[in-house]
Image: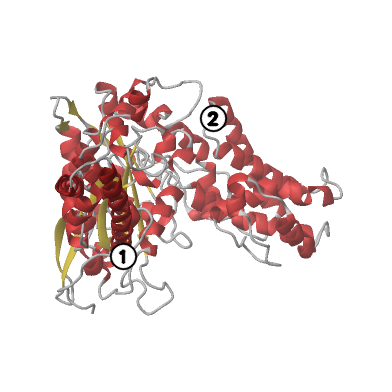
């Protein structure tokens, strides 16, 4: 290309203002700078720019004088240049926090949250949730050329019968009536979780706990789907309000929009209508059981599994047994039994979930996939690896805790593992002390750390158990897996559970061991389970928590009313829109980007104090 073509078109004032706005919004939304800091940056940069301009104009004046221009002509030239100072003009428009918010709303796709009046609680206090209309969010996404490109690319892909690579290869989507009759339909994935905005050990715990619901789409490529920038906020509500008012009140608008999406779809500007439905609701076990209206007491309830109706006594006596598979039909029969006999629960079901009102989704479809992070790495791996390490140290005497910890600390971790280096093992601990990914990392490198210290590897059943668990995790976490490997995984899991019971009969199995036995069939339903684990969603939620200010007079009233000011979708339609912003900082492969994180700058003036 020629030099002129490589330089691109000359930016005008509108393009500059848009990119300047993106830069300031990036400082606040992505780099988490408070508005006061951004204001200081703007003022200081403008001051430096003014000094630079003064220096340039002084040199220009001298040069023009040397060329023989009159003083009046020189003044006219300089004044004309000053009038065309687009940075000064842009900063004038974006001079205050309120001015910037106004420009953000007018310049970019903005989806305004809707306050949902829930009613008055038992204290007579009016309670609200905030709902970001899901149809408007989807419409804003579909108006983006970059998103449409990935949407079309995803829907042009043919399901692979020989390899499970994504959720589109699972039976849940392949057998869904909507996707069978309308191939262009969108596959929605919701994530729900509750989080504390104050010290979870303090006096304000539970009182300010917030339930958040997020959205991502199966219609974008998996590597983009895992990016927190592509996770869209749907709803915020205090958890205690959900328990008090119930699903029918809190999720009413969301279900209404999802029904309309299934039946009528979204009409685009080009006249095309695109429908969609839920394909999964992701969450930890507690959240999934709450959404599905299953019993949530995993340690005591008779029925603890949302995938089958096995009872606790059967599981304890025969860990490899499985109950009857839950289906939409069996679920409806249990609901009828509940209503007719006025029972508190039937086969672990408390009442019918509001999400079962959708035409193409049901919680027992299955529609509530497991989470590898909670079931495996913070469950089975955390407990069983600790159990095995204690046995190898205290009973078989292969190595000491000091030797193990020295190996952990001195091992060279590279790439992503360097950021997730496992912590030292606490002697005689019942669990690993790391978080999910650290536990995963430790299991992977454990043979490299202490494998040479195992005296007779072929004779150590406990060491074999660790290697077997390591192989299971490798299969479960694989981004692509064949049907033959799924069948082999089932054999490995059965062998592991049986071996675990034989080696440690005094240590009872946990419900998560039973959930693990369902993984092969769930891979067939959902595709690779790594595509639906909740840890990527949780990272976005932790970002939200880190930005909450100290003012928690009332978690919901402090959080939710500010959303209309800051809940933005940023539209970046082409590379030319990013002439002054690095593409690696604001990638344009999926737009608009939802900036849901501006929690620390929310205006709560006039809100009532917390009770």
- Tell me how far mark 1 sits from mark 2, CA to CA: 52 Å
**Who's the residue at 43% across and 48% down the image?**
536
**Who's the residue at 37% across and 20% down the image?**
2
Q: Is residue 65 above or below residue 167?
A: below
Q: Nearer the viewer, residue 389 or 554?
A: 554
Numbered tag placed on residue 40 in the rendering: 1
Question: x and y percent of residue 438 in the render?
Answer: 59, 54
Q: Is residue 335 above or below residue 212?
A: above
Residue corresponding to mark 2: 481
599 horizontally vs 603: left or right: right
Q: Residue furthest right?
A: 455
**Who's the residue at 34% across and 36% down the image?**
588
Question: x and y percent of residue 511 in the render?
Answer: 51, 54
| Mark with earlier residue (1, 2) | 1
The structure's colour scheme is: secondary structure
Question: x and y percent of residue 372 in the render?
Answer: 50, 47
Q: Quadrant of the C terminus?
A: bottom left
Q: Nearer the viewer, residue 63 or 282?
A: 63
Let me know if residue 227 appears in the view. yes
Question: Tag 1: Cα neighbours inside 10 Å, few (<14), some, or many (≥20)?
Answer: few
Let me know if residue 132 appears in the view. no
257 horizontally vs 210: left or right: left
Question: x and y percent of residue 242 in the render?
Answer: 25, 62
Q: Quadrant of the N terminus?
A: top left
Question: Tag 2: Cα neighbours inside 10 Å, few (<14), some, or many (≥20)?
Answer: many
Quarter-of-image position of residue 525: top left
222 horizontally vs 480: left or right: left
In terms of secondary structure, where does tag 1 sit? helix
Numbered tag placed on residue 408 in the rendering: none
Quarter-of-image position of residue 187: top left
């Amino acid at each position: 290309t020629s030099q002129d073509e490589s330089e691109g078109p000359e930016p005008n004032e509108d393009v500059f203002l848009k990119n300047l706005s993106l830069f300031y919004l990036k400082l606040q939304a992505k780099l988490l700078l408070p508005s006061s800091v951004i204001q200081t940056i703007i003022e200081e940069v403008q001051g430096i720019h003014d000094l630079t301009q003064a220096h340039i104009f002084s040199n220009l004046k001298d040069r023009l004088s040397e060329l023989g221009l009159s003083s009046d002509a020189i003044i006219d030239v300089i004044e004309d240049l000053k009038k065309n100072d687009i940075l000064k003009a842009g900063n004038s428009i974006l001079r205050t926090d309120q001015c910037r918010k106004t420009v953000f709303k007018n310049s970019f796709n903005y989806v305004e949250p809707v306050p949902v009046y829930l009613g008055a609680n038992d204290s007579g206090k009016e309670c609200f949730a905030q709902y970001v209309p899901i149809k408007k969010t989807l419409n804003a996404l579909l108006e983006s050329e970059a998103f449409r490109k990935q949407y079309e690319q995803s829907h042009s892909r043919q399901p692979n019968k020989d390899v499970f690579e994504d959720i589109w290869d699972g039976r849940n989507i392949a057998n869904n009536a909507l996707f069978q009759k309308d191939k262009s339909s969108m596959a929605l994935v919701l994530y729900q979780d509750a989080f504390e905005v104050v010290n979870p050990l303090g006096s304000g715990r539970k009182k300010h706990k917030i339930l958040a619901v997020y959205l991502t789409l199966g219609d974008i490529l998996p590597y983009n789907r895992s990016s927190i920038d592509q996770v869209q906020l749907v709803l915020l509500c205090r958890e205690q309000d959900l328990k008090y008012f119930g699903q029918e009140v809190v999720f009413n608008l969301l279900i209404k929009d999802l029904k309309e999406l299934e039946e009528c779809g979204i009409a685009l500007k080009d006249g095309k209508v695109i429908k969609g439905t839920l394909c999964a609701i992701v969450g930890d076990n507690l959240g999934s059981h709450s959404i599905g209206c299953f019993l949530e007491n995993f340690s005591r309830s008779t029925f603890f599994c949302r995938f089958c109706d096995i009872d606790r006594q059967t599981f304890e006596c025969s860990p490899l047994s499985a109950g009857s598979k839950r289906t939409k039909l069996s679920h409806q029969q249990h609901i009828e039994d509940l209503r007719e006999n006025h029972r508190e629960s039937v086969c672990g079901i408390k009442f019918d979930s509001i999400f079962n009102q959708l035409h193409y989704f049901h919680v027992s479809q299955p529609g509530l996939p497991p989470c590898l992070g909670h079931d495996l790495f913070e469950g089975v791996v955390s407990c069983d690896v600790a159990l095995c390490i204690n046995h190898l140290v205290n009973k078989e005497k292969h190595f000491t805790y000091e030797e193990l910890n020295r190996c952990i600390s001195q091992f060279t971790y590279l790439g992503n593992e360097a950021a997730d280096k496992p912590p030292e093992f606490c002697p005689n601990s019942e669990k690993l002390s790391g978080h999910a990914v650290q536990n995963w990392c430790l299991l992977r490198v454990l043979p490299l750390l202490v494998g040479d210290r195992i005296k007779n590897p072929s004779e150590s059943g406990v060491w074999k158990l660790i290697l077997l668990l390591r192989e299971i995790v490798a299969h479960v976490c694989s981004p692509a897996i064949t049907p033959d490997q799924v069948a082999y995984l089932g054999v490995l899991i059965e062998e592991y559970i049986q071996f675990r019971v034989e080696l440690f009969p005094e240590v009872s199995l946990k419900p998560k061991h039973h959930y693990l036995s369902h993984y092969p069939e769930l891979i067939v339903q959902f595709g690779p389970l790594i595509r639906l684990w909740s840890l990527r969603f949780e990272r976005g939620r932790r970002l939200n928590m880190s930005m909450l200010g100290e003012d928690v007079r009332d978690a919901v009233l402090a959080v939710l009313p500010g959303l209309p000011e800051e809940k933005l979708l940023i539209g970046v339609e082409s590379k030319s829109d990013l002439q002054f912003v690095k593409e690696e900082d604001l990638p344009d492969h999926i737009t608009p980007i939802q900036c849901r994180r501006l929690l620390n700058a929310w205006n709560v003036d006039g809100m009532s104090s917390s009770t």
